[in-house]
């Protein structure tokens, strides 16, 4: 395989950035050069695979859900980002660009599509959800291919090649694949996470729900929970009052070990989160983000539920009494948790980064230039 330069477009939250890093690691391992095109939220990376490599922070902002004035300003910023990206790509001439959704993907991929045909790189997007996101839906007609995390993705246009690759996960998460699930014989480890910044609803609902469990069951539970910084102390106090051992932090480090120890996970249903749960083979109770533009998280959670790999509670129904009842049923049934863990593991694709790199490389011979 000829050595190529490949641009990776990703930014914003970890849900978009983690799969980009996983793919970049695989591309570097295969001998390719990579550049990062991102937004100011992600910023320049001083650690990880992109550190010390060419990085470009482009202007831009999301348009969906904004007022008229803010949306207009965001559109102008995206326009500036597109023109800057076009100039950078014209100079560097990568063989391909791969975007991971959200507005940070728009300037590089749209800018690349505006280059003259003879200088235009191959253009790809990866969709991490079971519904094509707004940015990816806008970009899709211009793409040479789409990679998906789910076998069925709503909104993929006809005529655009789609390849099921799975969602690339961090190598230390991929290493959990195949380890299996050990049901609890005593202590029940509950992991509660809520996206990149945590979610207040879990801080409001989970502590009183656990406190209301029957004493014999409550005595077996210990919790690791992600909470917003401003909520940490009150969540700790609630668990302390209930006599439940708990580790509460705004950011959970050593996620692989925490997933390995978990008997049940409560959290959102973002693409990266459900991919990590599947690769690790862990049962989960999913509460989709209610404000997602196309209910992507609801579709993700439903896909796992349909495979008997998770349970879903919509946020309006996610109350302390409802959660107490559901946890009483789930935590008392070791066999049910184990079967659900096995079903989740059957959905995992720990080799997704390699599959995505294969998809890109399969098209690269069409562009014989080198970096």
Image (tube, rainbow, N blue to C red):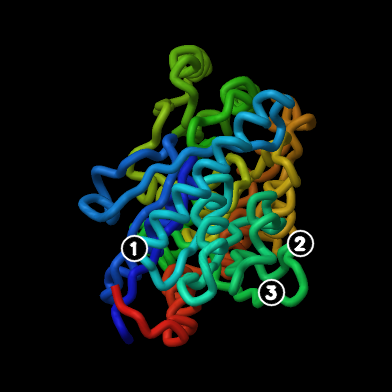
Which mark is nearer the camera, 3 or 1? Answer: 1
Position of the C terminus, as image quadrant, is: bottom left
Name above or below for residue 179 compared with residue 77: below
Q: Which residue is mark 3?
A: 160
Q: Quadrant of residue 317?
A: top right
Where residue 219 sits: x, y (%)?
51, 29
Per the rendering, the mark at residue 92 is: 1
Nearer to the camera, 273 or 234:
273
Kindly identify the residue that appears in the image at 42 percent across and 87 percent down.
365
Label 1: element kind: helix
Quick check: can you spot residue 355? yes
Q: Which residue is mark 2?
A: 154
Kindly identify the residue that appears in the image at 49 percent across and 26 percent down.
227
Mark 3 and mark 1: span between their CA atoms?
27 Å
Query: Would you say 1 lies left or right of 291 here?
Result: left
Where residue 178 sits: x, y (%)?
43, 69
Q: Quadrant of residue 163?
A: bottom right
Mark 3 vs 2, N-terminal side? 2
Name above or below for residue 184 compared with residue 59: below
Kindly identify the residue that appears in the image at 28 percent across and 54 percent down.
54
Label 2: element kind: loop
Q: Quadrant of residue 162?
A: bottom right
């Amino acid at each position: 395989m000829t050595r190529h330069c490949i641009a990776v477009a990703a930014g914003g939250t970890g849900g978009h950035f983690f799969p980009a890093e996983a793919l970049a690691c695989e591309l570097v391992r295969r001998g390719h050069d990579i550049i990062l095109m991102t937004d100011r939220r992600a910023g320049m990376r001083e650690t990880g695979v992109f550190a010390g490599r060419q990085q470009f922070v482009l202007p831009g902002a999301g348009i969906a859900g904004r007022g008229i004035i803010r949306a207009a300003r965001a559109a102008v910023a995206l326009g500036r980002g597109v023109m800057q990206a076009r100039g950078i790509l014209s100079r560097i001439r990568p063989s391909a660009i791969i975007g991971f959704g959200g507005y940070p993907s728009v300037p590089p991929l749209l800018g690349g599509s505006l280059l003259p045909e003879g200088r235009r790189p191959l253009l790809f997007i990866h969709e991490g959800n079971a519904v094509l996101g707004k940015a990816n839906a806008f970009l899709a007609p211009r793409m040479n291919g789409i990679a998906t995390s789910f076998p069925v993705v709503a909104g993929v246009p006809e005529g655009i090649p789609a390849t099921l690759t799975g969602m690339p996960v961090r190598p230390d998460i991929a290493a959990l694949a195949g380890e299996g699930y050990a049901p609890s014989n005593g202590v029940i480890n509950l992991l509660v996470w809520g996206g990149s910044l945590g979610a207040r609803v879990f801080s409001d609902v989970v502590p009183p729900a656990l406190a209301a469990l029957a004493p014999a069951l409550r005595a077996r539970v210990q919790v690791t929970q992600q909470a917003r910084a401003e909520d940490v102390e009150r969540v700790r106090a609630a668990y302390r009052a209930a006599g439940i051992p708990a580790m509460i932090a705004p950011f959970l480090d050593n996620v692989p070990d925490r997933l390995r120890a978990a008997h049940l996970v409560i959290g959102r249903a973002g693409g990266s989160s459900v991919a990590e749960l599947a690769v690790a083979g862990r049962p989960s109770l999913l509460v989709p983000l209610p404000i997602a533009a196309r209910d992507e998280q609801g579709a993700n959670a439903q896909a796992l539920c349909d495979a008997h790999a998770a349970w879903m509670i919509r946020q309006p129904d996610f109350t302390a009494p409802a959660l107490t009842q559901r946890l009483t049923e789930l935590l008392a049934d070791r066999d049910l948790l184990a079967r659900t863990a096995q079903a989740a593991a059957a959905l995992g694709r720990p080799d997704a980064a390699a599959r995505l790199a294969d998809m890109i490389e399969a098209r690269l011979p069409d562009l014989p230039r080198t970096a």
